[in-house]
Image (cartoon, rainbow, N blue to C red):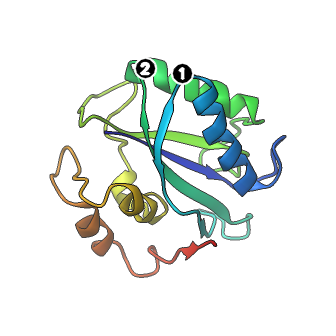
Amino acid sequence: MILIALGANLLSPAGPPRATLEEALLELQRRNISVLATSNFYESRAWPDPRDPSFINAVAQIEAKRTPQELLALMREIEIMFGRTITRRNAPRTLDLDLLDYNGLVEVGPPILPHPRLQERAFVLVPLLDVAPHWRHPVSGLSVSTLIAALPPEAAALTKLA
């Protein structure tokens, strides 16, 4: 199972963040990446500065006939296509695509697999539960539900969008 996270909190050439995520999913398909399932969209408070615009987040299960390195390179191309510029870590962005898991591979990278901070992020884990409720972390073996339960209550405060 290949899982990617999508996030945005700034306008892109595609429009507001949710439209950007929807268009990014279509762009993946145009590039021969099958999108098998997509989570609900969630709004989460920006971090580390909650004064920044809120993020819209989702997770998708995909199928790709590419290596993890090739997939990551493609994801970076798509981010740039949607206006992503890297200024500083955790800065607001037009589009963020992260490779969470690639068929359970454990690699020191690049890319690091599974994503090294996914178990700390409600904005990844909650949408991940939508698309892969039986997924287990390839290193710890913990279920996504167990990882969510281990988060501080305020960290798991996401708003599901209609």
Residue 58 image point, x, y percent = 54, 55
Residue in the image at 72% along x and 47% along y: 20
**Dot 1 corresponds to which residue?**
73
Disc 2 secondary structure class? helix
Residue 82 image point, x, y percent = 75, 36
Residue in the image at 61% along x and 41% along y: 25
Q: Is 67 above or below relative to 94?
A: above
Residue furthest bottom as drawn: 153
Residue 160 image point, x, y percent = 56, 73
Q: How many marks?
A: 2
What amino acid is labelled 2 in the image? Gln
| Quadrant in the rendering for residue 153 | bottom left
Residue in the image at 21% along x and 60% along y: 143
Residue in the image at 53% along x and 74% along y: 158
**Dot 2 corresponds to which residue?**
69
Rendered image: mark on residue 30: none
- Position of 18 with respect to 100 (left or right) is right
CB under 8 Å between callouts 1 and 2? yes
The local crowd at label 2, few if under 14, some if 14 to 19, many if 20 or more residues have their Cα within 10 Å, is some
- Position of 67 with respect to 150 (left or right) is right
Q: Is 148 above or below relative to 154?
A: above
What amino acid is labelled 1 in the image? Ala
The local crowd at label 1, few if under 14, some if 14 to 19, many if 20 or more residues have their Cα within 10 Å, is few
Disc 1 secondary structure class? helix
Q: The N terminus is located in which quarter?
A: top left
Residue toward you, 1 or 144 = 1
| Quadrant in the rendering for residue 159 | bottom right
Q: Is 52 above or below relative to 19?
A: below
Residue toward you, 132 or 84 = 132
Residue 87 image point, x, y percent = 71, 39
